[in-house]
Amino acid sequence: MNEKKSILKKITASREVSLLIVLIVLCIAITAKSPSFMTAKSISDMLKNNAVIMIMALGMLGVLLVGGIDISVASTLSFSGMTVGMLMKNGVVTSTPLLFLIAVAVGAACGLVIGLVIAYGKVIPIIATMGFMYIYRGMAYLISNSEWASAENLGTFKNFALGKTFGLNNVIWVTIICYVIFFIVMKWTKVGRMVYAVGSNREAAAISGINTKKIDLLVYTVMGILAGLCGALAVSVYASAQPNMLYGKEMDVIAACVIGGVSMSGGRGTVSGALLGSLILAIIAKALPLVGIESIAQNTVKGIIIMVVVILNVVTQRAMDKSNLKGREM
């Protein structure tokens, strides 16, 4: 009996397990209403179409872990995506690998500049990234020159998102690789431990010898790299490049992390939590039209579901904290 209680206690005191239960319940409820939801094609399409949010959630995880925030990610994505689109449209670059490298380089430069302003210029993250949100979006419009790249301008680049490797879509493979790398780095490397240390207690981390400015610079640069990568992916997935790409989607990236239990104050959050949060958000986006909810009401329903999951996270976290306190008392 005590063993059963112990297992139940572990389940209810685990944020990831709680999110997994929510994920399963959502899938069952949606499948009951729309049986086509759980087909292999439906799941593949859902993951492919939401890959950019899932990947950028990893970068946002790092930023939030150090106590920062970045609301410029969608603008960085748009800027890098438009760069790739216009290079193809004008016939300057046609190599798919090179175009991805260019997009990543543009994103890295954007993230590096933001990191320098925040880490060394000591500008508050929300203010700095708000400014760059407008700057990078404006630069996307400037390089577009009032034009956009359509499918006919993208050559073989658009085929990347249509192709498969070992039976799995290429975009999904990119997502998996990003998550595996982040899981290893955040769980088993010195860099990962330093990121958590800075977010948990910045002053203590500095005293222990961690260069907190370099860690800040690192997480914002990595965020930029992933946003740049997603800019190229978005162009391939949607077979077009427009300066208003994914306008406002930075909120979805942040929401995915918050749903996954990542603390906005830093020092708390996991890669698995970011993954589950992203999946829940992707399922909600896919499910609302399937279950017959009108488009005008979808944001309201989406917000309610997010709030329910966040409240569940808060309750679970309190249970974990209470359990930890009891353990110390013993």
Image: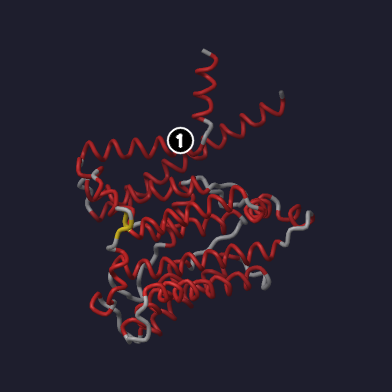
Q: Is residue 250 left or right of residue 125?
A: left
Give the x, y percent position of residue 54.
Answer: 42, 55
Instruction: Tell me which residue sits at (44%, 81%) in the image.
Output: 139
Give the x, y percent position of residue 146.
Answer: 32, 85
Q: Residue 237 is drawn in which quadrant?
A: bottom left
Give the crowd class for mark 1: few <14, some 14-19, many >=20 residues within 10 Å.
some
- For the residue pair 207 and 194, the one nearer the viewer reads as 194
Residue 58, above or below 130: above
Residue that extends furthest to the top in the rendered view of this protein: 1
- For the residue pair 42 and 274, the one nearer the viewer reads as 42
Q: For mark 1, what is the residue?
A: 18
SS under mark 1 = helix
Give the x, y percent position of residue 202.
Answer: 71, 55
Q: Which quadrant of the figure contains the C terminus?
A: top right
Count of numbered circles in the view: 1
Q: Amino acid at mark 1?
A: Ser
Instruction: Tell me which residue sits at (38%, 56%) in the image.
Output: 173
Residue that extends furthest to the front in the rendered view of this protein: 166
- For the residue pair 235 and 15, the one nearer the viewer reads as 235
Residue 175, above or below 144: above
Give the x, y percent position of residue 220.
Answer: 57, 65
